[in-house]
Amino acid sequence: MNNSNALKRILLLDDELDILTVAEIALSKVGGFEVQCYSDSKKAIAEVEDCMPDLVILDMMMPNIDGLQTLALLRSMKLVAHVPVIFMTAKVQKNEIDSYIKSGASGVIRKPFDPMTLADQVREIWERTGTGHD
């Protein structure tokens, strides 16, 4: 009866406010998730342990600290090192996706995304990672 492997809280990080808004609505209204939005990597990293997300969705191309650097920083933080990370990016060549996965990402969602299916894509990656079952 332990429901600890249910996906509830998502930290969403994207520097494009229109994308952030659409994704937040898609995940919260359509998907039913609690979504904490950030447009600044440094602020998200500073506050990630306070919101303790079940999952992080990161834009790959961010100013100052890009997606791969953010992922590396998250992996170095004891309390959130285990949290799955999905990249949301337009950079989806096979070699790029392979690089993201090799760096520790759980999956990749292509931009532009369909707001009506975004939550399902996130759930599919979540289930494929087997999160919470170990």
Image (cartoon, rainbow, N blue to C red):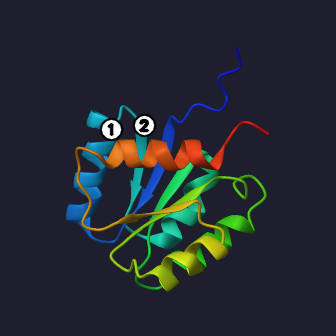
Residue 92 placement: quadrant = bottom left
Where residue 8 appears, as percent x and y from the top left, is 51, 34
The foreground one among 16 and 31 is: 31
Q: Compared to 56, does 4 lie above or below? A: above
- Residue position marked by numbered label 2 in the rendering: 34
Q: Is residue 81 left or right of residue 61?
A: right
- Depth check, front residue: 45 or 62: 62
- The numbered mark, 1 or 2, whose residue comes first in the sequence reads 1
Question: Which label number is shown at residue 28?
Answer: 1
Please name the residue shown 61% across and 45% down the image: 52
Residue 3 is situated, as x and y percent measured from the top left of the image, at 64, 23
When the figure is inspected, residue 42 is found, relative to residue 35, above or below; the finding is below
**Mark 2 belongs to which amino acid?**
Glu
Q: Nearer the viewer, residue 114 or 34?
A: 114
For mark 1, give the secondary structure.
helix
Residue 111 in which image quadrant: bottom left
On the image, which quarter does residue 91 sit in?
bottom left
Given the current orientation, which residue lies at the most extreme top position?
1
Amino acid type, mark 1 = Ser
C-beta proximity under 8 Å, tags 1 and 2: yes
Whole-percent x, y for residue 120 in the image: 37, 42
